[in-house]
Every structure is written in structure tokens, then in C-alpha cells.
Amino acid sequence: MSRLLVATTNRGKLAELGPLLAAHGWELVGLDAFPGVAVAREDADSFAGNARAKALHYAAATGLPALADDSGLEVAALGGAPGVRSARYAGPEADDAANRARLLTALAGAADRRARFVCALCLARDGAVLLEVSGECRGTIAAAPRGTGGFGYDPLFVCDDPSAAGRTFAELSREEKQRISHRGAALRALTAALARAPRSGAGAAAGGPAP
């Protein structure tokens, strides 16, 4: 089993990424195992750009293949906001509750509550990008938070998938959410791409099993 750095300190993201990646033969290491590593800059104007910057930075800093995730919520009535600023929507020190409260205030009286979650994943090693994939999930923003699971905007997001049955992400089990979420879609794209990669290419460089 080879080690793969999952470049996040977000425990919610790690909990979602972890099971599927571990099932494919990697020993996962989080950033908390490298407390002295400088924090990567996240100033790109796209999810893909931020994921790429983080993966390259942490792969170079730790010597491990690094998988970075950048994800967020885009709301149609807000011109795609909060977008890449999803985690800092209510300010640089804002917590999830503050971000949700600002979003509801911004949408007060809005008839159009369509939104989508986007997840970009980038796998890098030795200064090179090995794979980049993305996933999305479309839905609407609820009038008030519901549910106790998940993290971030999950208590407000109602996925269009019929299996959600009108529930927010925070009202779904982790398994239900994984099947329909943006992060689940991106992970499936990643593992499919690794399975197709030549053994001397991305699959080998990531320490994954031979195709």
C-alpha cells in the first residue's frame, strides 16, 4: 500500500474522500501529519486552478503524491457567487454558519434559487500534474437550513436527483450523498482515469494498483 497525501485540513472533505480512495489501495495521509508545511495560496479564479496550485505545492513540500480538492457553490441568482470564495463568503474568518446566513440574506426574496456544487480534483507528484478531473451536482437552495450531517452549505442544498427526495445534503446519509454529490462524481472520474492510465504513467506515479 502506497501513501497519498490528501491536501486538506477540512475534516468533512477528508471523510468523504477517504473511504473510496482507501478502497483503491492507498494509505491516506492528511495535512495534519505535516504541521510545518506552509499553506498553499488559493488565489486562482477557478476551482481547477486552485486545486492545481494546492496539489503542486503540497506534493513539492512533502515529497508525496498529493491529491487536492477545490470545491464550492455557485448560485444562479448571484451570478455564480459565492464560487471560489465559498469557504470565505462571509469573511476570511467566517465559519459555515456565517456563510450560510450570508447566502440566505443575499437570496432573500429571490424567486430563482437554482445552484450547483462543483468539485475539482488534481493529482500531482514531483512537480507535475498527473490528472485533473471535476464533478458537479445541480439543485436548489432551501429557505432555511435542514439536517445535521455534512458540512459547509450542505444544510441548504437540495439536489435535483430524485433519490434525494427533497432532502438537503445534510439530511442524507454519507453513502447517499456520495452517490449523487459533486465530490462523488469527481472521485469516480479520478479512479476511472487512474484505471485507464498506463502503469508507467499516472497510475504508477500515484502509487495506485496496476490497471
Image: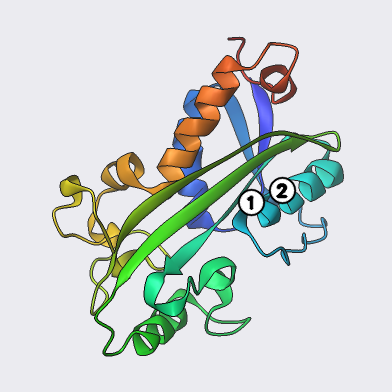
Q: Secondary structure at mark 2?
A: helix
Q: Check the image and report above or below for 187 versus 171.
A: above
**Amino acid type shown at disc 2:** Arg
Q: Residue 112: x, y in percent?
A: 28, 76
* Residue holding disc 2: 52
Q: Residue at x 69, y 11 (%)?
A: 199
- Callout 1: 10 Å neighbours few (<14), some, many (20+)? many
* Secondary structure at numbered mark 1: helix
Residue 158 pos. (x, y %): 25, 62
Q: Residue at x 36, y 59 (%)?
A: 150
Real-space Cα distance between discs 1 and 2?
A: 6 Å
Residue 32 shows in the view: no
Question: Label 1 belongs to which residue?
Answer: 48
* Vertical position of residue 8 compared to residue 80: above or below: above
Residue 5 position in % (x across, y down) = 68, 40
Q: Quadrant of residue 144?
A: bottom left
Categorize mark 2 by other alpha carbons within 10 Å: few (<14), some (14-19), many (20+): many
Examine the rendering and report whether any part of residue 46 can be seen: yes
Tell me the quarter of the image containing the N terminus: top right
Q: Is residue 89 left or right of residue 30?
A: left
User: Where residue 131 appears, x then y in whole percent?
Assistant: 66, 33
Q: Image check: 21 left or right of 107?
A: right
